[in-house]
Image (spheres, rainbow, N blue to C red):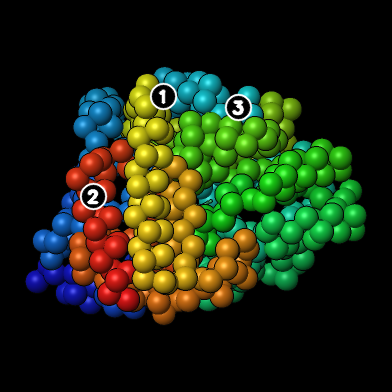
Amino acid sequence: MNSSESLFQRAQQLMPGGVNSPVRAFRSVGGTPFFTKKAHGAYLTTADDRDLVDFVCTWGPAIHGHDNEVIREAIAEALNKGTSFGTPNPYEVTMAELIIEMVPSIEKVRMVNSGTEATMTAIRLARGYTKRNKIIKFEGCYHGHVDSLLIKAGSGALTLGNPDSAGIPESFAEETIVLPFNDLEALDAAFSKYGEELAGVILEPYPANIGLIMPKSGYLQSLRDLCSKHGSVLIFDEVMTGFRVSAGGVQEKEDIQPDLTALGKIIGGGLPVGAVGGKTEIMDCLAPLGPVYQAGTLSGNPLAMAAGIAALKLLKESDAYQRLEKMGSQVQEAIETTLQEIGLPAQIPQVGSMFCLYFSEDPVENLQDATNSDTDRFNKYFHACLENGVYIPPSKYEGNFISTAHEQEAIDQACDVFVKSLHDL
Ligand code: KE4
């Protein structure tokens, strides 16, 4: 009675779409979503007692795999002292010190409870600090379900075909300018037209809610220069890429200093968390110091802080990124070789432990290219992988994640399945 099928039947009577987050519903790939009853290392165990190699990693947080012993013990130790105090606590100080040490541009940080809260706060800070209203975002970038950012958004919004959510007043949308990513002309034109009205620009520096798209050479630097020239706040949404592509995120890899950074996922070790950080002069606009209000009952709660501190220390003290890059390259090469063998046109961008697969003849450089990639073929590939014991994200617009726990058995097993699934297409 507790099969995924029966659980989903019950769930659909109780929760909209039977889920607590839309992308989990398998609406674009079709079929009934499996329920997970436990997870360990690189594997999920479903309610139907199937063990699956997991390339979703709970959408990014599980960079050390599931049920990591060090993180579990850190949570257990914190749990012995209580769950939430609603007062400052020592864990928050340690977490703030770690984030400031590891992320190049962050001088001060505010903990929140989700990536959405982090980007929402960053937008409000940019507007409060500059006393301007307009924001630039990019087609397909997803920054959580923030009213002024759910416009031509990616991830689940795109998967379900409603990148512009209902319920957002025109007056909000008018303050958001949406540009194609990687298009320097469009960027120049927007700054020429709106320059002094622009409070800020927010982007995923490596957009991974439309698959995985790399910025063209010089694009991020041009964006940095334009923001500096016009006094607009440059916001890197590194909720996904932070601590994922390197210890200091994209901003460390590309040596670009944003003014504000949104973080989440990995810094909670699997518990609810987000953070916004950046230049002191901007961050000090936040209450109780400044006029930009922001608050949260469970912000900085000791359990999420303890889990996140353990996760970050594991990254800091190990050669995790070299190991993750090695596995990412192994997957990329296995798929690339197979695509050439069978003459199947597809693109497989990969950076470190992030990759995706577009069934597209041409390189994918923006939302339009990603949308044009073959959805039916992706969906067949998704189900072939799942039938063979590998769970990749249930949407062509989502990125895949590898954890250090995938070494070496799970990654070898998965590569065999990827190759077989491509041959079966
Ligand atoms: P949360 O509010 O879901 O913690 O974070 C929102 C967010 C912000 N910025 C970026 C770059 C993100 O990728 C996300 C959330 N990512 C999606 C997956 N692409 C979360 C999965 C889901 O929505 O269920």
- Percent of width and height locating residue 110: 56, 33
Q: Amino acid at mark 1?
A: Lys
- Percent of width and height locating residue 213: 56, 56
Q: Quadrant of residue 261?
A: top right
State the residue position of label 1.
Answer: 316
State which tag comes first along the sequence, 2 or 3: 3
State which tag comes first along the sequence, 2 or 1: 1
- Residue at coordinates 45% horizontally, 26% vertically from top-left? 95
State the residue position of label 2.
Answer: 412
State the residue position of label 3.
Answer: 104
- Residue at coordinates 75% horizontally, 46% vertically from top-left? 223
- Percent of width and height locating residue 5: 19, 74
**For the residues marked 1 and 3, what is the alpha-carbon distance in whole angstroms?**
14 Å
Q: Residues within 10 Å of mark 3 (few under 14, many from 20)?
A: some
- Assign a secondary structure to mark 1: helix
- Assign a secondary structure to mark 2: helix
Indicate which label's residue lies in the foreground, 2 or 1. Answer: 2
Tally of numbered tags: 3
Q: Amino acid at mark 3?
A: Pro
In this view, 78 is above or below 174: above
Answer yes or no: is residue 368 visible: yes
- Assign a secondary structure to mark 3: loop
- Residue at coordinates 49% horizontally, 63% vertically from top-left? 347
Quadrant position of the C terminus in the picture: bottom left
**For the residues marked 2 and 1, what is the alpha-carbon distance in whole angstroms?**
26 Å
Q: Is residue 259 left or right of residue 385?
A: right
Q: For this rendering, which residue is in front, 354 or 217?
A: 217
**Label pair 1/3, CB-CB below 8 angstroms:** no
